[in-house]
Amino acid sequence: MAIATSLNQPFTQSGVGLHSGLETQVNVLPAEPGSGRYFVRVDLRDQPTIPASIETVKSTVLSTELAIEETSVRTVEHLLASLLALGITDARIEINGPEVPLLDGSAAPWVEAISGHQPALPVQFPVSEVTLTEPIWIADKDAFVAAIPAPQLRFTYGIEFDLAAIGQQWHSWQPDRESFSTTVAPARTFGLAHQIETLRAQGLIKGGSLDNALVCGPEGWLNPPLRFANEPARHKLLDLVGDLSLLGVPPVAHYLAFKASHHLHVQLARKIAQLI
């Protein structure tokens, strides 16, 4: 099977960052084989480069932020998940601000842009040749994320919220059986109505709106309809794929999470990185 590891043509996306509220433009360009996925802050004088790797993770508060010294880029997970799931292991990502645009809150616009700049070749989720010999578990109270030895790559995610419209829900995705583009990428980020003012007071979600995030309250969703009955669980799975992309390519395993977070995702990736 022919596998393209880089884009054939560049593409551009613009929009508002979820947390900063700033308008930014992202240009994703082809990169040399083996160079990996990396960000370039073209708005800064020296245009510093930030590799999309586990070593550059700076913060995991409601998104994943990467940094080299004082230069950072935030909310990278949706774009990185899309590149990984579509087999793009090498990409130069030029950005003129500190945060990747949220777009519609899902990875669908990224997938559409990537797919439109690739030839009609089979797409395969890239994986490491490393084989897990025993499970790796990261837990925090009743929340956990794990990598379990398995013959095929699979992701399973569960969430639980004390809101009737969400409750407990799960989603499982096997890349060789279902398309990322149609079953995972369209799932949008979501938030809880009662947390909005507190988060904004903390300087977060300045760019969040009912146009780019699902919002749930005691009476249900403020901006229905959902794209999937379990759209929140699918979105958390999307975030997990994005965070595991910081490994470059993950090993074959069953990645299982429940009530996890970017923080736990990254902890798992760091444990796996010790094996690669």
Image (cartoon, helix red, strand yellow):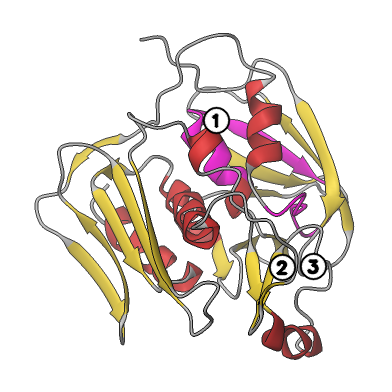
Residue 87 belongs to the span the image colors magenta: yes
Residue 238 percent across, percent down from the top left: 50, 51
Image quadrant assignment for residue 270: bottom left
Comparing marks 3 and 1, which lies closer to the viewer?
A: 3
Classed neighbour count for the residue bearing mark 2: other residues with Cα under 10 Å, few (<14), some (14–19), many (≥20): few
Q: Is mark 2 on a helix, strand or loop?
A: loop
Which mark is drawn over residue 265?
none
Q: Looking at the image, which residue is at 15% across and 60% down?
A: 135
Residue at numbered disc 2? 70
Height in image: 216 above or below 43?
A: below
Image quadrant assignment for residue 176: top left
Label 2, label 1: how far apart the Cα atoms are = 24 Å
Instruction: Please state which of residues 132 and 155 is positioned toward the viewer in this rendering.
Output: 155
Which mark is drawn over residue 90?
1
Height in image: 171 above or below 120?
A: below
Q: How many labels does the image show?
A: 3
Instruction: Please state which of residues 46 and 84 is positioned toward the viewer in this rendering.
Output: 84
Q: Looking at the image, which residue is at 61% across and 66% down?
A: 63
Q: Give the range drawn in magenta.
A: 79-105
* In-image side of 236 versus 188 (left or right): left
User: Considering only order in the chain, which callout, 1 or 2, is on the residue closer to the N terminus?
Assistant: 2
Residue 254 percent across, percent down from the top left: 24, 50
Q: Is mark 1 on a helix, strand or loop?
A: loop
Identify the amino acid type marked 2.
Answer: Glu
User: Considering only order in the chain, which callout, 2 or 3, is on the residue closer to the N terminus?
Assistant: 2
